[in-house]
């Protein structure tokens, strides 16, 4: 379906003018000497290691190296290929987005971030059809960030920004001002979904630590201790925090684990392997979680790489895993699920069908023409121990929370829109359902709440950033 949708969308797009720069609208005039030097670097890397490098060799005469800035050139070049349908997708507006990227990077690998400290959900809800007002929904708040100190929580609705309602004409600018921290301060009117409560607050940009370990706790239900970990990105610079959180859950007596990856769009292969190694029993020590298969003509990296579990049994020794997912769950998140299933570990998925990204990038950094550049072309496909890499269409959940007849008696048509903070089993249907599946009981806490949920027409959205499985090289 993904491949068919992509082909149909490309055919439709070919009949209309593409309004996006770097595809059909090159920069006017000749590019600079700096652009030419970086473009030459991109060309060399594509022909040496891109997964579809054979077609690059055949069709690179179509690449315009004279009229594109370096930051636009990669998308232009890849759009001239026909066989690389797994590198990205075509969105509803007909724009082709690629997983491959080249961008500038900061020389430090990890540092405190300056901003408001919150992430917004990419679907924007229609609050008033009569007045055409919309709500933003808070997807995550980093601990000790300015947003957290202002009392904002995951699931909160932003009703006004700087005393202005969110409308069809201003939603994009308002979204950017928060998500990209483009303003020094903002005043927000907040409505909390889990209580009859509204408040206003002013937030100024400040320093915070952007750890992907969003929340962890042990939930004790009638003597059964269930660990819960919300993890937002496979960021290898935070592996120590991830392992510390898992160790804390194990020390507190967790007998089962719910891994919440519903907003985790992927990241480091190494981090995914470390996570699975920490969860699995020692009987799986040395087992192959995944194999990365490259083009046999790849000139820079060996044709395939096996990633094996190491240090199993040192933290947990689980014989099964429950994962909360959504259509935002991608790449390394999907690798965890399919990698463990390849080792015959039962993995129960709660949520919606995942994005579907079974390919990844060898990421390298270099200084070219005075710029610190990170280049990440798609270079490999990912297979589990059974040779299965067929999740390019996404992984179907065991319980689809958007459907009425999902076998658990509760659903939320707006899922994965957040309704409550991390760990709130009384208001978070996904967490309540995961707990119920583990305990073999009905979803009592969520069933009552579900009947009270207000349905919001989702008429606007912001395109989520493209991310993927990354293997970093020095």
Image: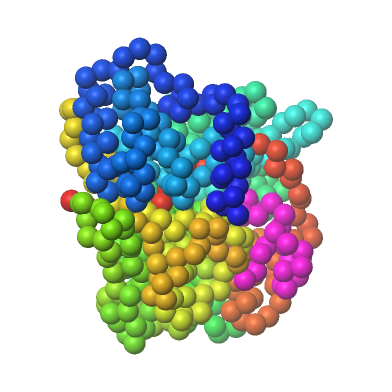
Question: Considering only vertical position in the picture, is 288 above or below 105?
Answer: below
Residue interval drawn in magenta: 398-425
Question: Considering only vertical position in the picture, is 447 above or below 232?
Answer: below
Q: Residue furthest top?
A: 29
- Quick check: is 408 in the magenta stretch? yes
Q: Identify which residue is drawn at 76% across, 49% down.
A: 455
Which image quarter: residue 471?
Answer: bottom left
Across and down, in percent, residue 208 comes to 36, 44
Q: Identify which residue is drawn at 31% across, 20% down.
A: 66
Residue closer to the observer: 313 or 368: 368
Residue 132 falls left or right of residue 427: right
Residue closer to the observer: 289 or 47: 47
Residue 345 falls left or right of residue 94: left
Residue 317 falls left or right of residue 320: left
- Quick check: is 8 in the magenta stretch? no
Across and down, in percent, residue 19 comes to 54, 24
């Amino acid at each position: 379906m993904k491949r068919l949708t992509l082909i149909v969308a490309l055919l439709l797009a070919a009949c209309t003018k593409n309004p996006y720069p770097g595809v059909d609208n090159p920069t006017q005039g000749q590019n600079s000497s700096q652009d030419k030097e970086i473009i030459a670097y991109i060309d060399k890397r594509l022909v040496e290691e891109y997964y579809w490098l054979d077609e690059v060799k055949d069709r690179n005469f179509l690449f315009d190296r004279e009229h594109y800035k370096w930051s636009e050139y990669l998308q232009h070049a890849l759009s001239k290929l026909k066989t690389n349908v797994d590198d990205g997708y075509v969105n509803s507006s007909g724009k082709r987005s690629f997983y491959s990227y080249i961008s500038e990077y900061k020389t430090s690998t990890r540092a405190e971030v300056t901003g408001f400290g919150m992430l917004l959900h990419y679907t924007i809800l229609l609050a008033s059809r009569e007045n055409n007002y919309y709500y933003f929904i808070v997807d995550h708040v980093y601990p000790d960030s300015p947003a957290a100190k202002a009392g904002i929580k995951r699931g909160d609705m932003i009703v006004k920004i700087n005393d202005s309602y969110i409308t069809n004409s201003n939603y994009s600018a308002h979204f950017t001002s928060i998500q990209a921290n483009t303003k020094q301060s903002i005043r927000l009117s907040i409505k909390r979904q889990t209580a009859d409560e509204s408040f206003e607050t002013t937030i100024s940009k400040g320093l915070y630590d952007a750890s992907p370990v969003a929340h962890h706790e042990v939930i004790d239900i009638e003597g059964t201790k269930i660990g819960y970990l919300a993890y937002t990105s496979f960021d290898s610079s935070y592996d120590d925090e991830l392992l510390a959180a898992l160790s804390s859950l194990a020390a507190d007596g967790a007998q089962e684990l719910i891994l919440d990856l519903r907003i985790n769009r992927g990241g480091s292969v190494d981090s995914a392997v470390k996570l699975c190694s920490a969860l699995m029993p020692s009987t799986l020590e040395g087992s192959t979680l995944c194999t990365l298969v490259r083009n046999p003509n790849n000139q820079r990296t060996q044709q395939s790489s096996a990633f094996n579990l190491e240090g199993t049994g040192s933290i947990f020794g689980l014989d099964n895993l429950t994962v909360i997912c959504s259509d935002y769950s991608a790449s390394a998140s999907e690798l965890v699920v399919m990698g463990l299933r390849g080792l015959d570990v039962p993995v129960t998925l709660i949520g919606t069908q995942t994005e579907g990204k079974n390919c990844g990038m060898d990421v390298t950094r270099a200084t070219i023409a005075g710029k610190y550049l990170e280049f990440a072309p798609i270079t490999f496909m990912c297979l589990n121990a059974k040779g299965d890499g067929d999740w390019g269409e996404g992984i179907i959940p065991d319980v689809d929370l958007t459907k009425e007849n999902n076998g658990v008696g509760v659903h939320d048509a707006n899922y994965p829109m957040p309704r409550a903070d991390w760990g709130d089993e009384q208001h978070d249907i996904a967490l309540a359902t995961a707990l119920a599946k583990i305990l073999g009981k009905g979803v009592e806490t969520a069933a009552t709440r579900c009947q009270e949920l207000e349905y919001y027409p989702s008429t606007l959205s912001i395109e989520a950033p493209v991310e993927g499985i990354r293997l970093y090289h020095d």
